[in-house]
Image (cartoon, grey):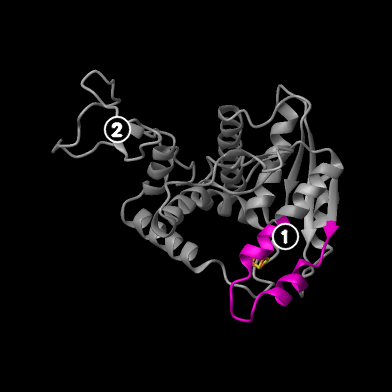
Amino acid sequence: MDTPVSANLQKLRKFLEGRTGKAIMDYNMIADGDTVLVCCSGGKDSYTLLAMLMALQKRAPVKFRLIAMNLDQKQPGFPADVLPAYFDSIGIEHRIIEADTYSIVKDKIPEGKTTCSLCSRLRRGIIYRTAKELGANKIALGHHRDDMVHTLFLNMLFGGKMKAMPPKLVTDDKAHVVIRPLAYCSESDIAKFARGMAFPIIPCNLCGSQENLQRQKIKEMMQDWDRRYPGRTESVFTAMQNVVPSHLADNTLFDFSGLTLDTPVDEGDIAFDTEPLEFSGAIPISPLA
Ligand code: SF4
């Protein structure tokens, strides 16, 4: 008989599979005949992503191929044997790419400055090249709902743009579609799942660089809000799916200049309503909350 812990884990797995499947369906992320390159860093998110995609592959109505990929960036102390051993243990086709981006980044970026943006650019180029070599038309990344919400705030507060991280995008060279199947999964559920599964996590600070400080601040802010008013991150994510251009201020999305008495406007004039806003989005509640 299952212990309560494994029953909970099973429940969480089913929940996350359901959320992942729904995101894949809603955004038409994977089609019959696709080859999906799954980017695995050794962190909780990408282990979870791979587990979800492998589970869904077994019962999906379409046939697709999965290739797990890890980029060994030659950071000091990177345990190069962990991911190949893990991939072998779960029987997934995989490719390990070795590229010393660590030295390039250290060489180009002055000491004390954050190295993440150059590092990410180099990594992106290598991932795209690998996808091309392997004939993968889709590239799956492990970003989750919280990453997407944090990016929205980051862009609004520091970049003056209402822009987040999309669940699906086409690469600049038009060669691949990048997908984020964990778009509907919360970071806390992923963290619980990763702990329960005892994934062999590779720490993400081997390079000695700090996570973008502004992103860290946004994350703390959202965590604080969520503690005080649970459900805020879900609410912001739902808002990203319910955009009302006529109630923002972007002239390119809504023709404010040409607005006349006859222009149909979504949601009408609620600018002066005094009653409190009622949240109407469907918030998925974690089964272990
Ligand atoms: S933390 Fe290190 S490995 Fe990660 S993106 Fe930044 S520089 Fe690259």
Which of 75/247 is in front? 247
Measured from the top left, where is residue 147 in percent x and y? Answer: 52, 52
Question: Residue 274, located in which quarter of the rendered image?
Answer: top left
Q: Quadrant of residue 264?
A: top left
Between the C-alphas of marks 1 and 2, the distance is 41 Å
| 158 w.r.t. 279: above or below | below
Residue type pointed to by label 2? Phe
Circle 2 residue: 256
Total tally of numbered discs in the picture: 2
Residue visible at 40% across and 56% down in the picture? 222
- Residue 166: where, in percent of width, then height? 55, 41
238 is higher (above) or lower (below) than 109: above
Q: Is residue 234 above or below residue 101?
A: above
Whether residue 183 appears in magenta in the rendering, the answer is no
- Which stretch appears magenta? 97-123
Q: Which residue is mark 1?
A: 122
Horizontal relation, residue 139 to residue 270: left or right: right
- Image spot of residue 173 (x, y percent): 71, 42
Q: Secondary structure at mark 2?
A: loop
Residue at 34% x, 30% y is 255
Give the image quarter of residue 211.
bottom right
Mark 1 / mark 2, whichever is N-terminal = 1
Q: In screen coordinates, is 181 left or right of 75?
A: left
| Left or right of residue 119, residue 156 in this image | left
The quadrant of the picture showing ligand 1 is: bottom right
